[in-house]
Image (tube, rainbow, N blue to C red):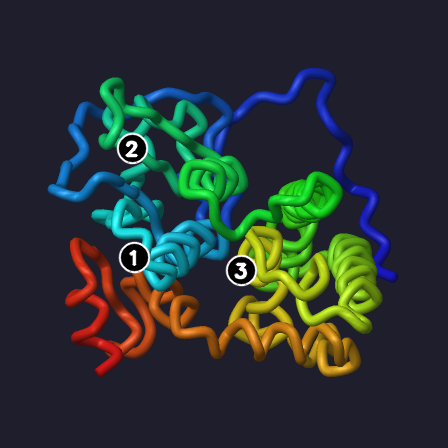
Amino acid sequence: MQDNNDYVPPKVWKWEAESGGTWASINRPISGATHEKELPVGKQPLQLYSLATPNGIKVTIMLEELLALGVKEAEYDAYLINIGEGDQFSSGFVDINPNSKIPALLDNSLEVPQKVFESGAILLYLAEKFGHLIPADFAKRTECMSWLFWQMGSAPYLGGGFGHFYAYAPVKIEYCIDRFTMEAKRQLDVLDRQLEGNRYICGDEYSIADIAIWSWYGNVALNEAYNAAEFLDAESYQNVIRWAKDIKDRPAVKRGRIVNRSWGEESEQVPERHDASDIDAKLK
């Protein structure tokens, strides 16, 4: 292991310069808006402001799944929030999400519009609002909630930990990569054991737990995030791979994962979505 003991933390840390690396220009130790800008508002009941990151596609997949189930009230406008350009720090966005992270949802179908932020909270809000993709049975619902919260608590170690130090950090630090790779593999093992004998995370019923977990761990396992599947020996988690491929093939997942996407193949980019035809045009 590398030996680097040169750095001594100061008594009081002060922000004096960007840390370097990808996303450094948007990181800062304070919250709040940096500029005044209202968010656009479309004609649909639900207004989504997001980007097709793992956290962002949770919500677009959920909405497309609801529409596939015939829930017309789940129609939505999806507006692109370019986090690289700091769109998440506009006054309009901060008004919905004081934490300045995508995704953010505004439900205009109510007399008093409801603001919802945090991807897990949005999934739960939509599941409860429309009565789909969440078990009705109390025990099964409790299990679903456990796995949803598992994802919300675990993913920062996969993304901000492993993903950052493996793929984005300006300096490759062996200790950090070893530490978070170990944790990422432990989490994949947790999932692999849970999926042994289960089609979905909570048994035979597809739910918001699958949507949340797949958006992170499914994409990593299928080498669609961080280009790290070989490094993680993802193929060895056979139950995870089977589950990840199964979910990826769902029509609603194919639709949801390309909404608010502005990179990659042209056929997989739908920066804004205002009705089904916006996606249909790309998937025809």
Q: Name the residue under label 2.
A: 107
For mark 2, give the secondary structure.
Answer: strand
- Label 2: few (<14), some (14–19) or many (≥20) C-alpha neighbours in 10 Å: some
Query: Seen in the image, is 45 located left or right of residue 128?
Result: left
Q: In which quarter of the image is residue 57?
A: bottom left
Q: What residue type is labelled 1?
A: Asn
Q: Which of 211 and 28 is in front in this view?
A: 211
User: Residue at 58% of width from left, 21% of height from top?
Assistant: 14
Q: Specify the amino acid type for callout 3.
A: Ser
Image quarter where the N terminus lies is bottom right
- Read off the residue under disc 1: 260
Between 203 and 246, the one nearer to me in the picture: 203
Q: x and y percent of residue 89 in the render?
A: 32, 31
Q: Nearer the viewer, residue 47 or 34?
A: 47
Compared across the picture, whether 35 is left or right of 122 comes to left
Q: In this figure, which residue is indicated by the disc labeled 3?
A: 215
Q: In 3D space, how far apart are the residues under numbered discs 3 and 1 (Cα atoms)?
A: 14 Å
- Residue 228 seen in this snapshot: no
Could you give the CA–CA distance between mark 1 and mark 2, rounded to whole angstroms? 18 Å
Q: Which sits earlier in the primary sequence, circle 1 or circle 2?
A: 2
